């Protein structure tokens, strides 16, 4: 579920299954992003540091900080707030088409600049995913 609140914030609820990759490493140029973990646990990349957060934890990511997330062993449910609000419905539609193979990944990378969601590389995150056997399709910001 995603909701835009008059341009002040974008609210998104995320459900991830056990050890499911969430968002690939990305950065927001002008938006703050806050994660409110409701249940389970998530592994979280912030810069080059990876930590595990649990139900009840809050993570605030300021603009310009590379970040990514994946579910822990029991899955995760989180509310994510992005402020200022960014209209992202077309971005998520494009993401679905890329994941279904109907559009090239390059279009998603280009769209990241429009939607303040720019993909970045992180060898630290890629090694972490491999070491923890977190596999599958990535979702959300990808």
Image (cartoon, rainbow, N blue to C red):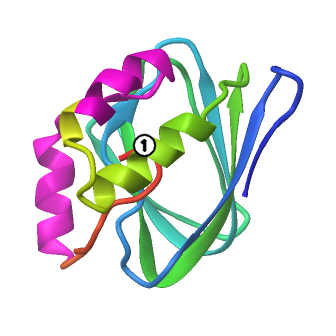
Number of marks drawn: 1
- Badge 1: few (under 14), some or many (20 or more) residues near its Cα, within 10 Å? some
Q: Is residue 127 magenta?
A: yes
- Which residues are drawn in magenta? 107-132
Q: Residue at x 44, y 71 (%)?
A: 71
Question: Residue 1, percent across and down?
Answer: 72, 58
Question: Residue 124, percent across and down?
Answer: 16, 47
Q: Which residue is mark 1?
A: 94
Q: Is residue 97 above or below residue 33?
A: below
Check disc 1 and report its element: helix, strand or loop.
Answer: helix
Q: Is residue 7 above or below residue 72?
A: above
Asked if one can make out residue 120 in the rendered structure from this viewpoint, the answer is: no
Q: Is residue 73 above or below residue 104?
A: below
Left or right side of 77 for 48: left
Q: Is residue 134 above or below residue 105?
A: below
Left or right side of 134 for 31: right
Name the foreground residue: 116 vs 69: 116
Q: Residue at x 30, y 22 (%)?
A: 110
Residue lying farthest front?
Answer: 102
Magenta stretch, overall SS: helix
Name the foreground residue: 90 vs 113: 90
Left or right side of 3 for 60: left
Q: Quadrant of residue 67?
A: top left
Q: Residue at x 47, y 52 (%)?
A: 140
Q: Is residue 27 magenta?
A: no
Left or right side of 54 for 84: right
Question: Residue 83, percent across and down?
Answer: 71, 24
């Amino acid at each position: 579920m995603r909701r835009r609140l008059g341009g002040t914030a974008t609210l998104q609820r995320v459900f991830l299954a056990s050890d499911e990759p969430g968002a690939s490493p990305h950065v927001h140029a002008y938006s703050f992003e806050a994660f409110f973990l409701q249940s389970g646990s998530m592994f979280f990349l912030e810069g080059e540091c990876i930590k595990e957060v649990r139900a009840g934890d809050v993570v605030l990511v300021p603009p310009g900080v590379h970040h990514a997330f994946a579910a822990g062993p029991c899955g995760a449910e989180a509310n994510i707030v992005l402020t200022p609000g960014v209209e992202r419905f077309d971005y998520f539609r494009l993401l679905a088409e890329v994941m279904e193979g109907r559009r090239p990944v390059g279009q998603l990378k280009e769209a990241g600049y429009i939607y303040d969601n720019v993909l970045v590389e992180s060898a630290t995150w890629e090694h972490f995913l491999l070491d923890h056997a977190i596999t599958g399709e990535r979702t959300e910001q990808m």
